[in-house]
Amino acid sequence: MDTKTIADLKIKARIVRKDIINMLSEAKSGHPGGSLSAAEILVYLYFKEMNINPKDPMKEDRDRFVLSKGHGAPVLYSVLAERGYFPKNELMKLRKTVAMLQGHPDMKDTPGIDMSTGSLGQGLSAANGMALAGKLDNKSYRVFALIGDGEMQEGQIWEAAMTAAHYGLDNVIAFIDNNGLQIDGFNKDVMKVEPIKEKWEAFGWNTISIDGHDFEQIEKAVIEAKNTKGKPTAIIAKTVKGKGVSFMENEAGWHGVAPNKEQTEQALKELEVLI
């Protein structure tokens, strides 16, 4: 990846983080921590990697994306708006009655959403279904899924992991947002999920460990995943919950709490983009 592309993607990730803070502040509710941790992953996929067309959101050969951790919808909404799927002013209507953007993704009312999610543990199963359909129809599209590390406490994730390996779904690439925290605290205290890499390997997946905030590492992992045949790939992305906002970083309390006016001002100051 050239330095210009990296610089552009970094700027875009900061813009996305500012969008997240602004929309949650306006809504006075939502989930900042896990949205901020996934910014680089989604920015890379939507601005560099995925075969998509905002003017034709349902085109048949598009790559698909499933946000299994549906409460992280703000980061997905920001990326979709920045990519041109809908006007950015929709972001400030987040969670408003009859508005398009609700607390969790809705594929019926929001352009660019490939799967409605919210109940944790279900996203990878949906991604598998899309990928298997692609295989049966001889389509070349790929399906990306973003899974929360706390979400791996759900048994359905492992049923889906077994299924993807059984059917050799090499068109499935799952990112694990490994920020180490969930609503009730550290994963290791609530329900230990480690060792993550070894578990996915044991279920028959190609596994890659990366820094989830490093665009070069994200790109290298995606290239390896695309070149891996006969098995799905899990990219275990080490991230920081609340990334980019000092008082939110690594704090479980910011899982599902919106910032007040003063906190919003401080966060936006920290995220100021110099173009």
Image (spheres, grey):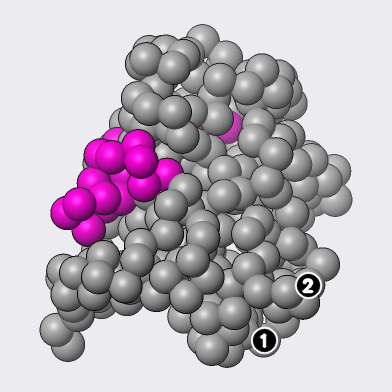
- Residue 32 at x, y percent in the picture: 41, 55
Residue at 67 percent across and 65 percent down: it is 102
In magenta segment, residue 235: yes
In magenta segment, residue 189: no
Q: Which residue is label 1 attached to?
A: 55
Q: Nearer the viewer, residue 262 or 61?
A: 262
Question: In this rendering, does residue 48 appear at all?
Answer: no
Q: Which residue is label 2 attached to?
A: 109
Task: Answer above or below: position of 83 versus 113.
Answer: below
194 left or right of 61?
left
Of mark 1 and mark 2, the one earlier in the sequence is 1
- Residue 29 at x, y percent in the picture: 51, 60
Q: Amino acid at mark 1?
A: Lys
The span picked out in magenta is: 232-255
Residue at 76 percent across and 63 percent down: it is 107
Quadrant including the N terminus: bottom left
